[in-house]
Amino acid sequence: MATMTSLQSLTLAKFPSLSFLTPTSFKFLDPFPASLSPSATSFTATASVFSPIRPTKPKRISLVTHASSTTAFPQNIGDVLADVTIFTATGESVKFEDLWDQNEGVAVVALLRHFGCPCCWELAKALKESRERFESAGVKLIAVGIGAPSKARILAERLPFPLDCLYADPDRRAYDVLGLYYGFGRTFFNPASAKVLSRLKELQEATKNYTIEATPDDRSGVLQQGGMFLFKGKQLLYAWKDEGTGDHAPMEDIFHVCCKVPVV
């Protein structure tokens, strides 16, 4: 908890525009902010609805960037993911197999947390700014977030972010297939979340037009962590699972892998 307290105090000092932070509610990570709950004291009762979720003792990990690995995924992960149905930001259903050429196409698939997560607005902004570089390397950018398509459109309009790259996965089907981390402990207590302290300027810039209204109506989705994946066809070339909130894959690592992939 000391890590989160330190994170909050440093953020308030360096990030005054985020005035919605309160002494008892660090809303970068809080899935049940006081403004959305019946009362500020109802957090414990609300959290208890998720009976399978229990606070866990944080794993001791280094804040140094961890290496990505595809070995933890089955060889047919591309086939399994291809059949998952999500939604475009305009509300049409679409399967992953229709998002890029499943034979030779190269795609970066960024799974954000939820559309109301400020750290995900920061990541979305970084992805948007990298889109031209990806496309020049023959790589398609795909960003998926948790929430209804209407929530995706809020992010797209206010950040802004290109609608043709943005998709909604309200039921977290792709997240389940890829085995991304989920739970109270990951969201609140993982030391990797402190990495956001090095990106406060970027976070402030990305959240100028932020609104908490982009948070999914199903509050269980805010306990989901994201990840970053690079595919060539159905072959998984790069995999990153966020250890905690804001523990995003280094963009330069992804570009490095992209440069090694021959584009047909």
Image: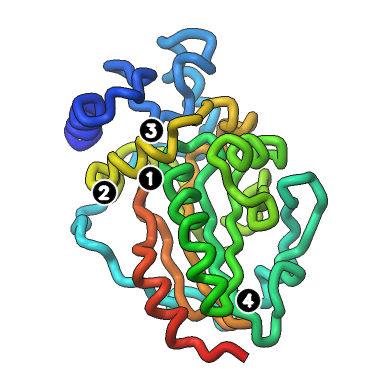
The amino acid sitting under disc 1 is Thr
Q: CA distance from mark 4 to mark 3?
A: 32 Å
Q: CA distance from mark 3 to mark 1?
A: 8 Å
- At x 48%, y 69%, the residue is 133
Kindly report which numbered mark, 4 or 3, lies closer to the viewer in this rendering. Answer: 3
The amino acid sitting under disc 4 is Gly
Residue 6, image quadrant: top left
Q: Secondary structure at mark 4?
A: helix
- At x 42%, y 11%, the residue is 40
Q: CA distance from mark 2 to mark 3?
A: 13 Å
- The residue tagged 3 is 28
Q: Is residue 133 above or below residue 260?
A: above
Who comes first in sequence, dot 4 or dot 1? Answer: 4
Who comes first in sequence, dot 2 or dot 3? Answer: 3
Numbered label attached to residue 245: 1
Q: Nearer the viewer, residue 121 or 128?
A: 128
- The residue tagged 4 is 78
- The residue tagged 2 is 195
Residue 150 appears left or right of 235: right
Q: Residue 42 at what x, y percent from top left?
A: 46, 13
The amino acid sitting under disc 2 is Lys
- At x 34%, y 19%, the residue is 19
Q: Decide: few, some or many residues near mark 4? Use Cα within 10 Å; few <14, some 14-19, many ≥20.
A: many
Kindly report which numbered mark, 1 or 2, lies closer to the viewer in this rendering. Answer: 2
Q: Secondary structure at mark 2?
A: helix
Residue 2, image quadrant: top left
Contact flag, marks 3 and 1 (Cβ < 8 Å): yes
Contact flag, marks 4 and 3 (Cβ < 8 Å): no
